[in-house]
């Protein structure tokens, strides 16, 4: 199956975790993928993994919290393939912090990556999409966008803002043939699961509460590939009548209390 044959897809934060799983899936289905990330070593390693898949993959070293860097990313992509069909706003950052001990600079850094980065990428990519007659944008949010979690006010607030950006741009960009949707992962086994040097998905409290007591009804954490599958669906023509939706990919966590 080649749902993305002849299409160009940008994936921010595409060298690790959900981003890398998405890059691999899109590439395996025909897309020319552009990986945007800050770590050149990881970007090079991701390209090596894509070598056997084929296509014209590209890594562009990009800090999406920098507006000029985003413009550079879009320019490199257009020079590479001449079009942008799919944009996956996946890049994020997280650290634990008590609200009363938070600093303005660190708060802004989270918003610059999760919200402003997605805004700049969406704005610049949408210009190209409008000129070519359409495109698809998928924002990787989190169930934290609609839930409160201690020591995560910066992340939760930014993901909530990203959800609203998804809805607003879906409404405003519709006349240009651009679809915008989002996914909201729950506990997914990625690098962000490691907090303070410990993978929270391997702790006794996670196993007892989320698995043993089925706070997550499916009683397990998710895998990056499971989120990537939903992202690819939303980016494909199979989701042609889906607009402004934010799809939970959380094993049912968001339906329990």
Image: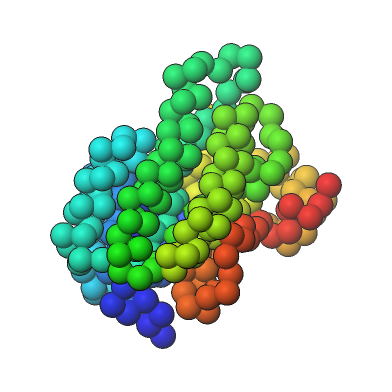
Where is residue 216 drawn, in percent x and y? 74, 54
The type of colouring in the image is: rainbow
Where is residue 105 drawn, in percent x and y? 44, 19
Q: Residue 145 or 255: which is nearer the viewer?
A: 145
Q: Can the viewer see residue 15?
A: no
Position of residue 13 relative to residue 27, above or below, is above
Q: Residue 217 or 29: which is nearer the viewer?
A: 29
Seen at 19% across and 54% down, the residue is 76
Q: Which residue is the extreme one toward the left? A: 79
Q: Can the viewer see residue 117?
A: yes
Give the total number of marks visible in the rendering.
0
**Which picture quadrant has residue 83?**
bottom left
Seen at 71% across and 36% down, the residue is 148
Position of residue 84 relative to residue 123, above or below, is below
Position of residue 53 relative to residue 90, above or below, is below
**Which picture quadrant has residue 2?**
bottom left
Q: Residue 90 or 49: which is nearer the viewer?
A: 90
Q: Which residue is the extreme one toward the front? A: 175
In the image: residue 233, left or right of residue 70: right
Seen at 41% across and 85% down, the residue is 1
Seen at 51% across and 42% down, the residue is 192
Where is residue 144 drawn, in percent x and y? 64, 42
Where is residue 31 drawn, in percent x and y? 32, 72
């Amino acid at each position: 199956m080649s749902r993305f044959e002849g299409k160009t897809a940008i994936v921010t934060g595409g060298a690790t975790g959900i981003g890398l799983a998405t890059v691999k899936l899109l590439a395996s289905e025909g897309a020319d993928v552009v990986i945007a990330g800050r770590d050149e070593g990881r970007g090079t390693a991701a390209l090596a993994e894509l070598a056997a898949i084929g296509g014209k993959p590209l890594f562009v070293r990009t800090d999406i919290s920098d507006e000029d860097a985003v413009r550079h990313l879009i320019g490199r992509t257009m020079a590479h393939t001449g079009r942008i069909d799919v944009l996956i706003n996946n890049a994020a950052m997280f650290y634990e912090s008590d609200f009363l001990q938070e600093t303005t600079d660190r708060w802004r850094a989270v918003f610059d990556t999760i919200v402003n980065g997605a805004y700049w990428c969406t704005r610049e990519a949408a210009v190209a999409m409008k000129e070519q007659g359409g495109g698809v944008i998928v924002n990787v949010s989190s169930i934290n966008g609609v839930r409160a979690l201690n020591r995560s006010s910066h992340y939760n607030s930014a993901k909530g803002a990203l959800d609203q950006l998804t809805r607003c741009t879906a409404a405003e960009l519709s006349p240009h043939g651009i679809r915008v949707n989002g996914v909201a992962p729950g506990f997914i086994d990625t690098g962000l699961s490691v907090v303070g040097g410990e993978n929270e998905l391997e702790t006794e409290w996670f196993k007892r509460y989320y698995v043993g007591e089925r706070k997550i009804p499916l009683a397990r954490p998710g895998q990056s590939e499971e989120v990537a599958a939903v992202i690819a669906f939303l980016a494909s023509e199979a989701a042609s009548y889906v607009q402004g939706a934010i799809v939970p990919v959380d094993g049912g966590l968001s339906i329990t209390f």
